[in-house]
Image (cartoon, rainbow, N blue to C red):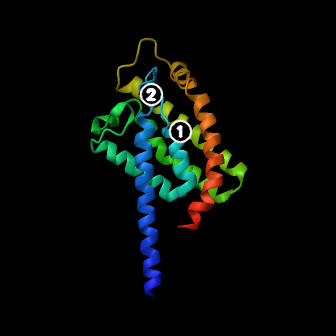
């Protein structure tokens, strides 16, 4: 192995670590930028947007790893989750399913983009990531309220989805913007990887 090859490999690994840390930090910012707005039991955040961008810009594997790092930072007690929360007790919160869904969202979005690297593919990947985030997170929230958390009076499956209808337009618009933004930015990032 030549010195140039070793330097190139080290540079690539260093850049991956920087990207992982950057998206973990962006998730922390996105979690709390507007988390004072709470509809039902769901804070309004920009996390879905950043999870989608992680998948688009970093790819399936590194994007998912960045979301895993974010989740572990929060579970370790650093207040990076919505409403400046963190700690192991978050595992049983009704919204922890959304935190888990960011890992799957980044991975699936990255996979779709890797297979269909067109503008349409990027937008469809972002919309699919939003759908996955909502499906996983909302079903977790419903199960948490029904099985181990005190459900609000009259809480039903339909009410859980009604709560999610409020942030849905924002998340759909941001998903399309993430797809378009990622389509323009990904070639630049790939050039330096």
Q: CA distance from mark 1 to mark 2?
A: 14 Å
Residue bearing mark 1 = 133
Which residue is farthest bottom? 2
Q: In the rendered structure, which disc, 1 or 2, sits on the residue that comes first in sequence?
A: 2
The answer to whether 58 appears left or right of 14 in the picture is: right
As helix, strand or loop, the secondary structure at mark 2 comes to strand
Task: Say which residue appears at 47% left-offset and 53% top-offset.
Answer: 64
- Front residue of 142 and 44: 44
Is label 1 or label 2 in front?
2
Total number of numbered discs in the rendering: 2
Q: Residue furthest top?
A: 153
Residue 21 location, quadrant: bottom left
Residue 91: x %, y % from top left? 34, 37
Residue density around tag 1, few if under 14, some if 14–19, many if 20 or more, within 10 Å: many
Specify the label residue 99 is tagged with.
Answer: none
Location of residue 180 with respect to 145 vertically, above or below: below
Q: Are marks 1 and 2 in contact (CB under 8 Å)?
A: no
Please say whether residue 114 is visible from this viewpoint.
yes
Give the percent coordinates (x, y) of residue 124: 67, 45
Q: Quadrant of the N terminus?
A: bottom left
- The residue located at (28%, 38%) in the rendering is 87
Which quadrant of the view contains residue 174? Answer: top right
Q: Which mark is residue 43?
A: 2
SS at mark 1 in the image: helix
């Amino acid at each position: 192995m030549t010195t140039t090859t070793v330097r190139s490999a080290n540079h690539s690994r260093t850049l991956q670590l920087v990207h992982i840390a950057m998206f973990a930090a962006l998730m922390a910012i996105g979690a709390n930028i507007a988390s004072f707005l709470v509809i039902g039991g769901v804070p309004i955040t920009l996390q879905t947007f950043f999870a989608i961008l992680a998948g688009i810009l970093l790819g399936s594997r590194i994007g998912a790893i960045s979301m895993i790092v974010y989740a572990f930072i929060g579970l370790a007690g650093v207040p990076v989750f919505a409403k400046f929360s963190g700690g192991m007790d978050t595992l049983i919160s009704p919204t922890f399913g959304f935190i888990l869904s960011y890992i799957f969202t980044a991975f699936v979005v990255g996979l779709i983009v890797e297979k269909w690297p067109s503008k349409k593919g990027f937008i469809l990947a972002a919309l699919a990531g939003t759908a996955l985030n909502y499906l996983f997170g909302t079903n977790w929230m419903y199960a948490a309220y029904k099985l181990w958390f005190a459900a609000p009076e009259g809480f039903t499956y339909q009410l859980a989805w009604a709560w999610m209808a409020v942030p849905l337009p924002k998340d759909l618009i941001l998903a399309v913007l993430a797809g378009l933004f990622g389509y323009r930015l990904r070639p630049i990032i790939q050039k330096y990887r």
